[in-house]
Amino acid sequence: MELLKLLFWIMIFTVVYTYIGYGMILYVLVKMKRWLSKNKHKEVYQDFQPEVTLFIPAYNEIDYVDQKMKNTMALDYPKYKLKIYWVTDGSDDGTDLKLKEYDNINLFHKPERNGKINAMNRVMPLVKTPIVVFSDANTLLGKDSIKHIVHCFSNPKVGCVSGEKRIFNKDKDMASGAGEGLYWKYESTLKKWDAELYSVVGAAGELFAIRTDLYNEVEQDTLLDDFVISLRVAQKGYTIQYNPEAFAIETASANVGEELKRKIRISAGGIQSVVRLRTLLNIFKYKTLSFQYVSHRVLRWTLTPLCLLLLIPILSILAYNEGMLGFGFYVVLFWLQFLFYVFALIGWFLENKKTRLKILFVPYYFFIMNLSVVLGFFRYINNKQSVNWERAQRAA
C-alpha cells in the first residue's frame, strides 16, 4: 500500500505540474526577469521591412483560394516586398487551375501527392527572400500580421517567430469549438511567458516564420513539420519568439470526432518529434530551452496521459482501503476524480448541443486531448500514421 501511495504522489505531481504548476513557475520566473531587466534599454527598429515570402502549402483547397487571396492582398505590407508562393502538389480538385487566375503569385504544382513536407522541401530552395512566412490555406491572417512577425526579426538572435492561432468563437459553441477556443487562449498565455523567459517551444503551422537560410530539409515522413522546423532553428542557438499581434484565425473542428482525428495525428507526430529531437532533453547543453521543452511539450505527449490513466485504478484502491463512504483524503480525491469524468460524460452528451456555458466542455475536451495521446502512441508505434494526412473538417 505504501508503494501505491508513493506512485500516487509521483503521478499527481506530474499531472498538476504539467497543466498548472509549470504555468505558475513560468509566471514567477517571468516576473523576476522583468524586475531584473527593467532598466535595460531595448533597441526598436520600426523601419525594418525586408522582403518576405508568404509560403502557402495547399492540398485540395479550391474552396478557400479566393478568400485566402483576398485576405493576402489586404495585408498591410509593401506589395513589392511580399512574394506569394502557393505549393499545390497532389491537388486534383482544380486548386492549381484556380490559382492560375491570379498573376501576382508563384505557383508550384506537381500531380504526385507525396505529403506537405516533401512539397516544402522541393520549393524552399527556390525562396530568395531573407524571411519566409508559412501559413495554411484555410486560415485568415490579421491585416498587420506580416508586419508584426517581421518586426521581431530585427533582433538578430531571433530565428523563428510564431503567430497566434485564434479560433472563431460564437456566443454559442458546440464542444469542439468551445473546448478548442479555451485551450488556445490558455496556450497563448503560456507562449507569451515562454517567449519572455527565453523561447517558445515550437510554432503552430497556421502562421509562423523563419530566417530562410536556417531552413534545413526535413525527413520525408515527418508528421509535425512546423514543430520540427521551428525547434531545429532553436537548436542552432536562435530563439523562437511569439507575437500575438500576428494572428491566424480559423473555425474550430466541425465536431469532437473531427477534433479527435486531428489530435490523434498531432499526438503521433508529437511522439515522433520527441524521438527525433531527443538531444533537446540535454539540459546541460540547452539549459532553459530544455526546461521549457520538457515542461511544456514532452510531458504532455508522454508521461502525463499515462499518469492520468493509471490514477484511476490506483486512487480507486487507495480510496477503497480507506472506506468508500468515509471522508478520508483518498476517498475525497476519488470522488472528485469521479465527478470530473462525470462532467466529461455530460460534455459528450451535450457534444452537438450549443450553449453559452462553454466551461461545461472543458473536462470533455481535456479528456479528448489525453485520449488522443494514448491513441496516437499506438498509431505511431504501429507506423499507421501516413505523412499524407486526412484533413479534419472545419465548422462553417
Image (cartoon, grey):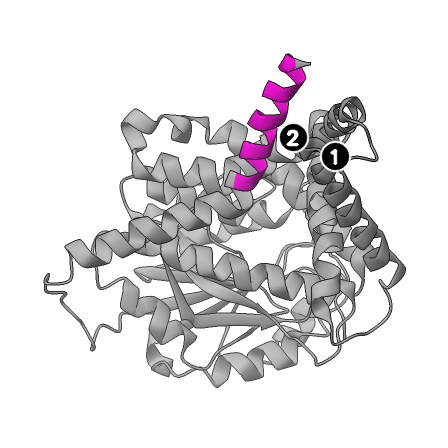
Q: In this view, does 145 lie to the left or right of 166?
A: left
First along the sequence among labels 2 and 1 = 2
In which quadrant will I find the C terminus?
bottom right
| Three-letter code, disc 1 | Val
Task: Please tell me how crowded label 1 is: few (under 14), some (14-19), or many (20+) other residues with Cα within 10 Å.
Answer: many
Task: Please tell me how crowded label 2 is: few (under 14), some (14-19), or many (20+) other residues with Cα within 10 Å.
Answer: some
| Residue nearest the viewer, comparing 191 with 96 | 191
Residue 223, percent from left and from top: 61, 41
Marks counted in the figure total: 2
In the rendered image, is residue 82 in sight? no
| Three-letter code, disc 2 | Cys
Task: Examine the rendered structure and indicate whether residue 361 appears above or below residue 48.
Answer: above
Q: Is residue 206 magenta?
A: no
Region in magenta:
2-16
Q: Which residue is drawn at 66% across and 75% down?
A: 169
Separation of marks 2 and 1 at Cα, in angstroms: 18 Å
Residue 256, percent from left and from top: 79, 57
Q: Which residue is drawn at 43% across and 71% down?
A: 246
Per the image, the residue denoted by label 1 is 331
Q: Residue at x 85, y 52 (%)?
A: 345
In which quadrant will I find the N terminus?
top right
- Main SS of residues in magenta: helix
Per the image, the residue denoted by label 2 is 307
Residue 388, percent from left and from top: 70, 46
